[in-house]
Image (cartoon, rainbow, N blue to C red):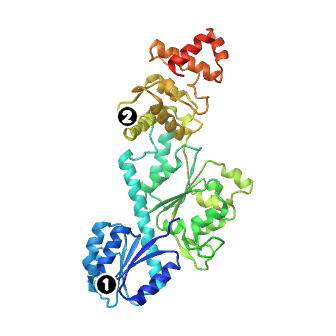
Amino acid sequence: MPRNRVLLVEDDRGIRFGIRNFLVGRDYDVEEAETIKQGEEQFRQNRPDIAILDYSLPDGNALEVLPRLKASDPSIPVIILTGHGSIDLAVRAMKEGADQFLTKPVQMQALLVIIERLLDNQRIRQREQARTTTQARTGPVDPFIGVSDSISALREQVTRIVTTDRPILILGETGTGKSVLASWIHKNGPRAEEAFVDLNCAGLSREFVETELFGHEKGAFTGAVAAKTGLLEVAHRGVLFLDEIGDVDVQVQPKLLKVLEEKKFRRMGDVRDRVSDVQLIAATHQDLHESIREKKFRSDLYFRISTIPLTIPPLRQRSADIPLLAEFLLNRFRTEMGAPGVEIATPAMRALQEYSWPGNVRELKNVIERAILLSDRHTITPRDLRFEAEGDTVPSGVVPTDMTLEEMERWYVEQILREENGHVDSAAKRLDIPRSSLYSKLKKWRV
């Protein structure tokens, strides 16, 4: 992970030396400057993660350069230091865009806390900006697309509980859209203006989950060369989404339970309690009751996180929703892939509805995206569909009727070849034609 870069603009060598050594010892890279001119050049050229400016410098003061720095990159936090602080000066600095105003002598630990908080806020804003940009390009993702009774019931249930900040447990098979629903709940809930932080716990080791959630102090274990902020701190006052919570190690589970009950936790290697007020949204495809019986999941944690259980139905139980879902995905891919005229033919849509969808909505997305890439026409036909669980074939009984005679012949020959695992002799026998004739057709079609 790259080290955070600090630009320190200070003409007093003693102060500069002290701050630099303190921050370097906490795993920061520090770039130094003695004047406004030097500081402004380094700011533009090197783009630090955060800047610390002395108010009074040989060639001017920080308030003169602050508007130019903010105009160059408003996302970079700026801290101003001064030996002669006043309320009026602090107000003026904040109006010009300063993120913090400190008087000398600076308490190093307080400075470190401020730097970490500003950088955490910066990361949150960057994530939010990235999410907003994605949604502006693709449109907001609606987890309730469809007309089936099951998705309508889920929509009604979520609408009733979305304003709460109690723990929520989302249940559903892999690929049903649990993370999409969690994101929607955050966006429409009481913590919408705060951070949404997610972690997929599937297959992660106990050590990794623990350090990701709680963070650690420098030297807490071998390889901990610097302190690390955990996701619980980043998500403070916001929403923490733990996907596949059933995979969380049983040794980590009581620590997570303590956070939910007391809103307190400790970094690894630390003795000080930290406060984290988060709404937990958890998700799993596992049967947690079975995991409790097998001693893989704590019953007290289960009862704490399952205050509000929500179940997303699998796609095979909501085939009536597939046309709307397919059109939604197609519209998104039209924009992303530059294919504005692509449509799904009626036989292909019928094939989509008759397929079993073991991978649920995620698999539907993959099938449609693949079909757009493979199709050489503006219409997606059954022969463009590649289903992952049925040997790349269209579901049995679905025969395309929107092709020319030659296209139908090619589609049928390809179907037989797939069923015969590519063996030309076997396919020729089933087609009741000479092997040489089949080879000629395959060569003509470049199959």
Q: Is residue 298 left or right of residue 110?
A: right
Q: Which residue is mark 1?
A: 55
Indicate the secondary structure of the residue bearing disc 2: loop
Task: Please indicate, yes or no, whether residue 350 appears anywhere in the rendered image.
Answer: no
Q: Crowding at label 2, few (<14), some or many (≥20) Cα neighbours within 10 Å?
A: some
Residue 122 position, x and y percent, is 41, 67
Q: Are marks 2 and 1 in contact (CB under 8 Å)?
A: no
In depth, the one of 250 and 348 nearer the eye is: 348
Q: Is residue 447 above or below residue 123?
A: above
**Foreground of the two, 341 or 157:** 341
Kindly indicate the quadrant of the structure image that contains residue 248: bottom right
Kindly identify which numbered label has been placed on residue 444: none
Quadrant of the snapshot with the C terminus: top right
Q: Residue at x 57, y 17 (%)?
A: 413
| Picture coordinates of residue 400, whole percent (x, y) | 49, 19
Which sits in the foreground, 64 or 359? 64
Mark 2–mark 1 Cα distance, whole angstroms, equals 55 Å
Secondary-structure class at tag 1: loop
Q: Residue at x 42, y 46 (%)?
A: 141
User: On the image, which quarter does residue 333 sit in?
Assistant: top left
Residue drawn at 58 percent across, 79 percent down: 272
- Mark 1 nearby-residue class (10 Å; few <14, some 14–19, many ≥20): many
Amino acid on which disc 2 is placed: Ala
* Residue 390 higher or lower than 298, as above or below: above
Q: Position of residue 111 (x, y in %)?
A: 44, 81
Q: Earlier in the sequence, mark 2 or mark 1?
A: 1
Residue 339 has which mark?
Answer: 2
In the displayed structure, would residue 180 be above or below residue 417? below
Say whether residue 324 is visible: yes
What amino acid does circle 1 point to?
Answer: Tyr
Q: Is residue 45 left or right of residue 282?
A: left
439 vs 141, left or right, is right
